[in-house]
Image (spheres, rainbow, N blue to C red):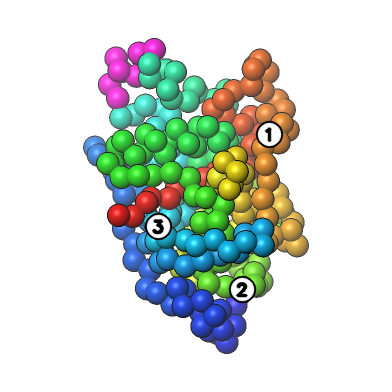
């Protein structure tokens, strides 16, 4: 955990971190689950040695939960007849072979195992449902949000992240560790989160419950690895699910007017 002196230094070093972070709840019309979003101020972050200016945006306080993702992939927003049309079948994820939550837990747990395409299509669906512009964070936005004005990683990492030494090889309920200075939970560990790099490719950020404590950093990233679909017997591999990606999740961003 950052000491009060260290936290004060981090806030003074970045005026944007001193801004009061407002939150709002996003709902899918006709459904009860909500996505809690935090409005972040404008600022800047250094990525790959380059300074990137960040406009104000909103980001999920936690990784996206199953109760929201279920509405999308199980087609709970559609009638039985609508869900069975060819157009919907092609536009929504197929059902995975096993339990999508891998037995880790469902309510309050991060949705896991989706491909980057599935995450992108979910954001497009969420945008249509809410009338707002939802998408995956850019890599720069993700790092800006994870830092929350801090120059150094939070310590001890056990207080902030589920990782190799404390997670027992499973995902945990979101929000059960301490948040960063902007009130965001699980930016490190638990589930790695899809984001979009400057070159337009999808990468996961923040690490996951299989990572060791000394591996965590603001800049840590992973590109798609074929091993994430190693046990997928389909040819070609599923475009919706990572058969061995039980540590991959997502966190959504909403563009602000």
Relative placement, left or right, of 61 versus 201 is left
Residue beneath disc 1: 228
Dot 2 or dot 3, earlier in sequence = 3
Could you say whether the residue bearing mark 1 is in a helix, strand or loop?
helix
**Magenta segment, which residues?**
78-86
Relative to residue 26, is residue 68 depicted above or below? above
Q: Nearer the viewer, residue 65 or 39?
A: 39
Residue beneath disc 2: 151
Dot 3 or dot 1, earlier in sequence = 3
For the question of whether residue 100 can be seen, the reply is: no
Tell us which disc is closer to us: 3 or 1: 3
**Image quadrant in which the C terminus is located:** bottom left
Dot 2 or dot 1, earlier in sequence = 2
Mark 1 surroundings: few (<14), some (14-19) or many (≥20) residues within 10 A: some
Tell us which disc is closer to us: 2 or 1: 2
Could you say whether the residue bearing mark 3 is in a helix, strand or loop?
strand
For the question of whether residue 250 can be seen, the reply is: yes
Relative to residue 100, is residue 91 depicted above or below? above
Relative placement, left or right, of 68 versus 184 is left
């Amino acid at each position: 955990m950052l000491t009060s002196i260290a936290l004060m230094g981090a806030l003074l070093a970045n005026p944007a971190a001193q801004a009061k972070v407002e939150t709002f709840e996003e709902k899918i019309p006709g459904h009860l689950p909500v996505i809690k979003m935090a409005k972040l101020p404008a600022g800047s972050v250094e990525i790959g040695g380059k300074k990137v200016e960040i406009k104000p945006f909103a980001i999920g306080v936690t990784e996206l939960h199953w109760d929201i993702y279920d509405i999308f992939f199980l087609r709970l927003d559609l009638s039985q007849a609508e869900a069975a049309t060819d157009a919907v079948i092609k536009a929504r994820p197929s059902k995975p072979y096993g339990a999508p939550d891998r037995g880790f837990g469902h309510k309050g747990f991060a949705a896991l195992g989706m491909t980057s395409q599935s995450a992108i299509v979910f954001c497009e669906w969420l945008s249509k449902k809410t009338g707002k512009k939802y998408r995956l964070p850019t890599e720069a936005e993700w790092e800006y949000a994870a830092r929350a004005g801090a120059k150094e990683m939070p310590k001890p990492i056990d207080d902030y992240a589920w990782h190799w030494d404390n997670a027992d090889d499973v995902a945990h309920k979101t929000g059960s560790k301490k948040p960063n200075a902007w009130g965001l939970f699980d930016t490190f560990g638990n589930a790695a989160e899809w984001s979009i790099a400057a070159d337009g490719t999808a990468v996961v950020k923040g690490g996951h419950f299989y990572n060791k404590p000394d591996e965590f950093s603001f800049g840590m990233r992973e590109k798609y690895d074929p091993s994430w679909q190693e046990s997928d017997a389909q040819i070609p591999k599923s475009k919706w699910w990572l058969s061995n990606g039980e540590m991959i999740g997502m966190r959504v961003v909403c563009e602000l007017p």
